[in-house]
Amino acid sequence: MTTHDQLHSNRLRYEMSVELVKGEVSKISALRSAPHTKQLQFSVDICLVALGVRTAYLVDALTPPDPVSVFTSLLKSLRSKSQLFGDVFLLSVPMHMQTFFVRRTVLLEYTLLNFPSFVLLDQNLTVSPSEPDGLRDILLNWSCEILRQGGLSCSLPDDLTQEPLIPLAGVLLDYPLAYVPVSAHQSTFLAGEPLDVYEVAFNHPSRDVFSTPGTSEFVFIKFSCPQRVGEKDSSLSPSCLLLLLKHKFGFRLENIGASVSIRHYTEKLDRVAL
């Protein structure tokens, strides 16, 4: 099979997977009342996890009243229909009312060598030489329990504070850098700080209804890096991050027969949501 034929085959598999998820979503009363565009966005993001394009998806498109129960039921149904979803499990963070769809095998590949850079949210925005306390324990516990057993879901303990949880989200969402609060009570982040913002997208045929009007791209990764961090650490400079993103996601997007598109711009915000 030629490279072109392989990409075409991958694209067909991806499109069929999206249609499968859409069909299963439409069968669940707590989900089918959502706008069609939100159902489609949700379906695409889950398939990006299942096909190894991204490690995890933090659900933001659909908000059922009992997300863990609803999404566990959906995932169980998807696994019964396709082996593609056998590697996907749910991670819930009850304290923060967050739910992630996570691909087990991609997460197991994380080591100290491919962790993101960790940026402490102190006055100097220090780049830490090691991961935050507690983060390695969380990942090791997954490796020994849920990840190797093929379970449907896992819930994080309620006593975890934002110091390990925020950088954990950075790891799961494939960010090249992850922010680390300096305390459990820190509530203001990067106010007025000049930021380099990065968006990773892939191209769609114009017929795709979930594309933004006037474009043909679906953004699935968005993160920021303080400009002064990139100025003092060349590995986090725009030139290096753009190259890293192009290489990492350009390769992964071949799994769905798509090409990568990366946008970079600068902005200041009153507060950054982490």
Image (tube, grey):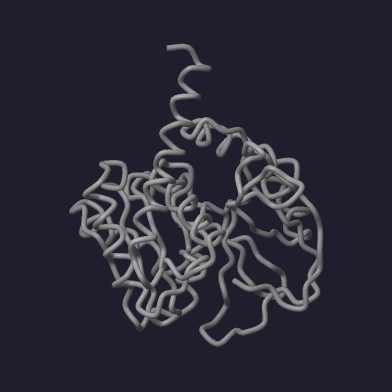
- Residue 38 location, x and y as percent? 54, 62
Q: Is residue 6 left or right of residue 268?
A: left
Image vertical order of residue 41 relative to residue 109, above or below: below
Q: Nearer the viewer, residue 260 or 211?
A: 211
Please report the residue visible at 41 percent of the width from the left and 34 percent of the height from the top. Answer: 13
* 54 w.r.t. 274: above or below: above
Q: Quadrant of the C terminus?
A: bottom right
Residue 165 rendering spot, x and y as whole percentages: 46, 71
Check the image and name the residue furthest to the bottom: 185
- Which residue occupies the foreground of this view, 172 or 17? 17
> What residue is drawn where x is 74% and y is 53%?
230
- Residue 191's x, y, as percent? 75, 77
Q: How many marks?
A: 0
Q: Can you say which quadrant of the picture contains the N terminus? A: top left
Of residues 172 and 135, the one nearer the viewer is 172
* Residue depicted at 44% across the width and 55% down the height: 56
Residue at position x 60%, y 44% from top? 208
**Left or right position of 165 against 151:** right
Placement of 176 over or under 3, stated as above or below = below
Q: Position of residue 93 (x, y in %)?
A: 39, 74
List the single residue furthest toward the left.
149
